[in-house]
Image (cartoon, coloured by chain):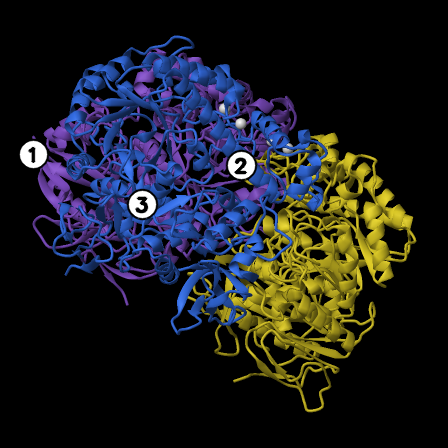
Chain colours: A blue, B yellow, C purple
Amino acid sequence: MNLGVCYFPEHWPRERWETDIEAMAEAGLEYVRMAEFSWAAIEPERGEFDFEWLDEVVDLIGEYDMQAVLCTPTATPPKWLVDEHPEIRQETFDGTTLEFGSRRHYCFNSDAFREETDRIISEMAGRYADNPAVAGWQTDNEFGCHETVRCYCDDCEAAFREWVAEKYNSIEDLNESWGNRFWSQQYNAFDEIDAPGPTPDGHHPARLLEYARFSSDSVVDYNAFQADLLREIDADWFVTHNFMGHFSDLNAFDVSDDLEMVAWDSYPTGFVQEMSPEEPTVDELRAGNPDQLGLNHDLYRSARDRPFWVMEQQPGDINWPAQGTQPADGAMRLWAHHASAHGADGIVYFRWQRCLEGQEQYHAGLRKQDGSPDRGYHDATQAADELAAIGGEDGVDHVDAPVALLFDYDSCWALEEQPHAPDFDYWQLLESFHGALRARGVQVDVVPPTNDLEGYDAVVAPALHLVTDEITTRLEEYVEAGGELLLGPRTGVKDAYNKLRPALQPGPLTDLVGATVEQHDTLPERIETVVSPVDGDDSYGFRTWAEWLEADDADPLFTYEMDGIEDGHTAAVRNSVGDGTVVYCGVWPDADLADELVRPLLARADVDYTERLPDGLRINHRDGRTWVTNFTSDAYRLETGDDTDWLVGDSTIDAFDVAVADDDLSDEFGVEPLE
Amino acid sequence: MNLGVCYFPEHWPRERWETDIEAMAEAGLEYVRMAEFSWAAIEPERGEFDFEWLDEVVDLIGEYDMQAVLCTPTATPPKWLVDEHPEIRQETFDGTTLEFGSRRHYCFNSDAFREETDRIISEMAGRYADNPAVAGWQTDNEFGCHETVRCYCDDCEAAFREWVAEKYNSIEDLNESWGNRFWSQQYNAFDEIDAPGPTPDGHHPARLLEYARFSSDSVVDYNAFQADLLREIDADWFVTHNFMGHFSDLNAFDVSDDLEMVAWDSYPTGFVQEMSPEEPTVDELRAGNPDQLGLNHDLYRSARDRPFWVMEQQPGDINWPAQGTQPADGAMRLWAHHASAHGADGIVYFRWQRCLEGQEQYHAGLRKQDGSPDRGYHDATQAADELAAIGGEDGVDHVDAPVALLFDYDSCWALEEQPHAPDFDYWQLLESFHGALRARGVQVDVVPPTNDLEGYDAVVAPALHLVTDEITTRLEEYVEAGGELLLGPRTGVKDAYNKLRPALQPGPLTDLVGATVEQHDTLPERIETVVSPVDGDDSYGFRTWAEWLEADDADPLFTYEMDGIEDGHTAAVRNSVGDGTVVYCGVWPDADLADELVRPLLARADVDYTERLPDGLRINHRDGRTWVTNFTSDAYRLETGDDTDWLVGDSTIDAFDVAVADDDLSDEFGVEPLE
Amino acid sequence: MNLGVCYFPEHWPRERWETDIEAMAEAGLEYVRMAEFSWAAIEPERGEFDFEWLDEVVDLIGEYDMQAVLCTPTATPPKWLVDEHPEIRQETFDGTTLEFGSRRHYCFNSDAFREETDRIISEMAGRYADNPAVAGWQTDNEFGCHETVRCYCDDCEAAFREWVAEKYNSIEDLNESWGNRFWSQQYNAFDEIDAPGPTPDGHHPARLLEYARFSSDSVVDYNAFQADLLREIDADWFVTHNFMGHFSDLNAFDVSDDLEMVAWDSYPTGFVQEMSPEEPTVDELRAGNPDQLGLNHDLYRSARDRPFWVMEQQPGDINWPAQGTQPADGAMRLWAHHASAHGADGIVYFRWQRCLEGQEQYHAGLRKQDGSPDRGYHDATQAADELAAIGGEDGVDHVDAPVALLFDYDSCWALEEQPHAPDFDYWQLLESFHGALRARGVQVDVVPPTNDLEGYDAVVAPALHLVTDEITTRLEEYVEAGGELLLGPRTGVKDAYNKLRPALQPGPLTDLVGATVEQHDTLPERIETVVSPVDGDDSYGFRTWAEWLEADDADPLFTYEMDGIEDGHTAAVRNSVGDGTVVYCGVWPDADLADELVRPLLARADVDYTERLPDGLRINHRDGRTWVTNFTSDAYRLETGDDTDWLVGDSTIDAFDVAVADDDLSDEFGVEPLE
Ligand SMILES: [Mg+2]
Ligand SMILES: [Mg+2]
Ligand SMILES: [Mg+2]
Ligand SMILES: [Zn+2]
Ligand SMILES: [Zn+2]
Ligand SMILES: [Zn+2]
């Protein structure tokens, strides 16, 4: 495990640097991430570079046997640069130019900014080439933060025109592909195509989807530009980027193709406030939700199928969510173990010390504003000791996931554009299925539908909205060969251009599913929503969305038991195809129903699973070890057999506590509430 | 009854056209509305016209003994046109120019667009002059949709200056009429008058009302321009327009003066979500509210005092409200009968087939995306058979309404500008009175206060806010001659320029009412609101608004029974004038109180009425027939006498069911819940 | 007591002027405020002045032994002026120019408008110099209304650059002071500094605080410009300004330095709707909240430490809050007495008669639109008689407040920028402490922390967020000398530039407090929040914010009794310093806890206090008299001893009633509900 911390030496007097770095080393930290917002410190005026401060800090880091992770400082072009090149600024959908005064105030398609990027990276990376104290680089910082993936400036408009001209054979091809006959939206030339902006009614879904793809591609291209520059200068250091959690606008799989290593920034108490379907519970406010975090861990681990880093780990209270609530005692330690359990190889706390100035004064560090240890510091040192004791081999210890969850950015973008129900949210729907797997102690990879699936015992695709022929073939071959596939609602609705097909849903997957969708329905909370298994009396709830199915080859699994039009219709079917099985579920299941779908799937796929774990208590397997993490304020007794070799903790797990066993606990695993 | 469907042949391959049209004919449909968004299909480049596709479809329609209703395609000027004339685009109140990419992206006062309109209509209408397969034309499509009546561009600003210069003798006259001494808002010349825009505080109510009138007049003028063009080309076809429901910004009475026939677009499950005072019930989510629909049916029927068309009838689930909930089984049939019962002569379903592309993919058609019949198709064919069996004579069968409800756009606009209570809504207040009449099985005309009233047994004016001398005289003469008049709160407050008069409310109506308004009060829900009849003990509720009255000649009818300042004051009065009676009610009545006002009104006016019907179950009389429509999920037994001749259904009416009798059921009519 | 009314003769025909003024005199009114929006009436075209109407009215006022308070009409520059100088208009944060059509459409930093101001004031004031019927002037009207203190136009940007250049020695000094290393926000020259505008993420807190200060200073400077002009013309008349209630953006202390007399505009039923922490109760909707009003009375009285005027007193229902609810019977009389009790020397009702035209038609006057007396008129005449009977000497009768509440605009601005909890509101936090003092019948001065404190027995500083060395010294000296100090949460967090200090909170106050803040926490409602005294079992609630303390010299007073991380930590401490005591409370107390903090404070400070009064019933002492004001719909018996000399009312106080005794009732005072 690589432990580290984010540090801003440029904020502190030179005389503190060595004290700080010595203290980091003593705390068991090995990496120091720096310089992501330091452009003005490095180049206070055009062409006048000041590397002295950074040289000195990098040297000190080396002296204490640590390594620096440096960042390209492109997220914060200085005022003099913006004043020289005001055209680099982003423009919002409604035409507002975003000014200097925070960060991320540049456009990914600006030629001027591309030149500036080249210049600053060449200077900066050139200076530290072959420096053994520099381990690698982070490109920029949190691409897309503050809704900056999608820019609507003139440079972007021009680039979008080029992008479509490259993608389509002709304007007729584009009109046909998008379906521009609708509302007389045909174009006569690529030059007629604008970046979207304010219109009387909503935009064409094909145009919006293409703009989303183009915007994501623009960042991919800009990141590749940075990564290539860095590698040209020194091929030995790693290049990474710190992604964000539950972030839709940027295709992280595509960006990751140009990275050696994937990293992301984990802020558990912020995520539960901003991304949960309901108001967070008190426990969630204090420690976050392990499955919400886990979904991101799994996604970013899968992006390169290797251990990832948490490049910013929440250290205490934070400034950006509505409530700056303090984490529970031990939460920072819990998060470190939980990340490790999900396959992290590095955990870098953000930040070393609470900042005295600027926008993040209400963001804790491992040290308080006066330099004394804060709550996170004690957690971090405990975690460092424990993780060292556990051992493990960096870049090698593997999370072996028997189940793949398919995450499709195209489907996500299309559904965000046309949710058709106020509370339809792609991420939350994925969480429903992911959470059901995690509640059975199962490891999950989160991969795009274009990935190779043959290694997985089971595949779950909660809302594979856009389906191409390629994906169809891939899924058919997977099931034929014995794969177990679980599909969720709104699957197979659209073609690659966000158009309906002239066939009933699930479109090209109809043969595979053995059924068609006869109707879809959106259901506000005040309509009671119930399904029952065809072979039983139990009732299960669902939310937001219902499709009723006409089974052809497939067997009905669940039927609606409701007042009104759904009643008696089929809600889910199972179909045997070749050596495998496909289940199509037409509703957004609540947790009990999701378990009823996932348990038989695991059984058919011969995947080990546990009893159903309490909310907030999770186990993970990684390379022969088992982590138990408790995100609740309740204590539990773990039933694991007598000879369990506990590396951390033991079979009594307290509130917000962790236990790690040197063993693959799974079928034998049980949990009892204490008291 | 004229049944039809909206069709977009330009979206489908030529080889499907005949199949589709044959299927329409088989379904009992006689009209095909087309081409309202087809400008780019007809004129893909300036001056290059392609009518081949439309010719062929019109011919096919003729061959199958149907007729086309064509539309001028002006709602969607193509991209090439917008690029040539960017000045045609609308500008919002806050100065944003609305771009190409949806529809309605043109300004009604653009000279350039007027020229383009002339050009495309001349070409298109010229082509189909004297074509017997073309029955008539719809001008444009849903004028004002997406809040486009009021544009604030330079063309509109110039046109507004001309409009005021024409209306007022001098700038002094304007200043005096508006009351511009307030806050130094005098102008020295018409040229100083701008279109409204962002200001520190709210705008002058007179200026806003005039801008609302000017904006409505701009659409009236543009529609007349289209209608005149069409009639010049062929005097035989009818010209209509498809209005929207509960739509305030456009004076439909004024537009209708230039139409042979009025049509509107009915989307019951959308309206209950967007225009109801409270969250819709589950039944309303599934079938809409019959009185909300009925108010619009009555308004558009009354606009030309003749049968109207529903030009777009909701066919199933729809895309634009928050919830895309499926209608109840039978709802599409129910709506067809309900429209017919309210005086419709035509019902045109929107659309034939679910569209594969563009903004409306989540909008059902009578056919699914694969061409197979959808739920609406079965309903539509059943309704077609039943309506054919019922018979009736188009353009002749009359709804004989004994009661007029006065709808005044000026009052609506003035009250929208100054609601003075967060939940004061003119449409919803009208519904309270209209619904009370409908719950007693009474037919209602919805007419402007400038209409001739002498044919009506009773007149109800829920909030006749702006009152001119002309209206005063009209109402006085009506009552003197024996008319029965019921006035609601906020009546007689303003003069024609949205100024207060130097007299207590109801201003010029004071003599007629025999009382003045001493105070008005706005009442949030947490204040208990109760009135009692002066001669009884019952308590009745009201909402939002209270006026207390000082009776002069009039007799108190209701007094407030409340904690606090209203207590003991008079809430409603009755006054005898000549041979008639006036009741003034100073509160927004709840349903029970509205019934207490309406029942005696009907009795005095000698209008037949039924027992009070359950919410959602309604009866209508039209030309000797009676429709019973059930918008609820409950079944009822209808008590109608033994010899009722049922044309559709019978005395047992199921959930969302219809019964039609060949008889004028009314005083003998009763309803009992089944089970 | 000076009673008056606001009058707009320019809205009414000349023939009514004498009738109106005679009626005012008869009603006991002595002052007529006029002309604040009259620019266009006075100068209908550039250079063409019409003073005839105003001359005549001023003469009439003199004839009836009344006096005019004239206003500079700068709040409403006429259209011709705006068209000549469009550059005077304000620009919003997001770049929108605010147009003509309401009021306050000018920028405080516009040179062009400064010239126009000079011109109109010179003409107007010159005309009335030495006119004995003109008592004084109000500058402009409600500076900052409709969020107009902060303008972002080019003139403001240039003025801001000058302002910072004047304040800071060098750009390096500014960078260092603000902390601009954060996110590369350094500037290389003052000319690089822009007015804030839209940015991807939030702005730098130092830049925002300086813009807030600059904006307030701009108004201060503009007001001084007006006041100086007026005094140059006639040194004898007073200059005042009518401030608003609970208004943050403008430093009223600074503006008041240039005024002889402070006035403010009191709208009780509007304030409870717009500025209360919760939905107002029915009683509050009908009469407002006495402590909310009282906080403003106390602030504006303290601004010049002398009697103030209410320049606009709510006369009845008003137009601008969400609900235009009628005040309770007697409320207008209640407010007049309550203002007098808090130290008002003048009460001017807004307005004489309901206006027939423009934006304020839904605002009552003392007279209805037809000229007949409205409810407020009867209240006002009763209050006039009673206040005359009570006697008192204008400008002399003093409110002797033993306690100072520190109000700090810098802290207010900093906390509005970074509330860090959705419901943290500086004004409401101040009300919690102010209300606790008022519930014990204590008079309170509201003063800035830079004021001399030695005259006060106790000082309360609810959230002294920004603390300078000067303030530190002042507070230390105050306590050393025997002062009693109560500090609230979030005190001592920031330096003068809105930066954290490199020391734990309360920073420079740590020695004084004898404790440090170990952590802060924000607490949404769903977390239970309880503290208990260290020496007792009672439980007390708090809201929103918790700090836990490490006591050094200080003694713990309260500890948290909660599930979770706060439990057992110290919530408040007491420290003895020199001859005085400091209490630091780390939470936002509910009313019971605030009383537990305030009662011992008063006891230690030897301040007389009453039993705890019911919500809404308050007593005030002023110059040997005691006012009891009842803002509730309940009646009470007052226990005051047998020999109380009642000047108004008696010991039975009805709903919304007043009693005034010629005695200093306090320790002997009790209250019992009347059934
Ligand atoms: Mg654009
Ligand atoms: Mg404009
Ligand atoms: Mg600017
Ligand atoms: Zn851009
Ligand atoms: Zn326009
Ligand atoms: Zn300005």
Structural crowding at the residue carrying mark 2, measured as other residues with C-alpha within 10 Å and reported as few (<14), some (14–19) or many (≥20): some
Question: Viewed as shown, does residue C602 lie left or right of A232?
Answer: left
> Residue at 52% of width from left, 36% of height from top?
C61
Place residue A673 in its image quadrant: bottom left
Q: Which label lies toward us, 3 or 2?
A: 3
Q: Which mark is residue A400?
A: 3
Question: Viewed as shown, does residue B197 lie left or right of B545?
Answer: right
Q: Position of residue B397 (x, y in %)?
A: 80, 72
Q: Which mark is residue A213?
A: 2
Q: Can residue C165 be seen at all in this image of the molecule?
A: yes
Callout 1: chain = C
Q: Can residue C275 be seen at all in this image of the molecule?
A: no
Q: Which mark is residue A482?
A: none
Question: Are tags 3 and 1 found on a single chain?
Answer: no
Quadrant location, the C terminus of chain C = bottom left
Where does label 1 land, which residue? C553
| Beta carbon at label 3 within 8 Å of ligand 4 | no
Q: CA distance from mark 3 to mark 2?
A: 31 Å
Structural crowding at the residue carrying mark 1, measured as other residues with C-alpha within 10 Å and reported as few (<14), some (14–19) or many (≥20): some
Classify mark 3: helix, strand or loop: loop
**Is C393 in front, or is A89?**
A89
Q: Position of residue C475 (x, y in %)?
A: 17, 29
| Kind of residue at disc 1 | Asp
Q: CA distance from mark 3 to mark 1?
A: 57 Å
| Beta carbon at label 1 within 8 Å of ligand 6 | no
**Is C594 in front, or is B296?**
B296
| Kind of residue at disc 3 | Asp
**Is C302 in front, or is A512?**
A512
Classify mark 1: helix, strand or loop: loop
Residue B660 position (above or below residue A297) = below
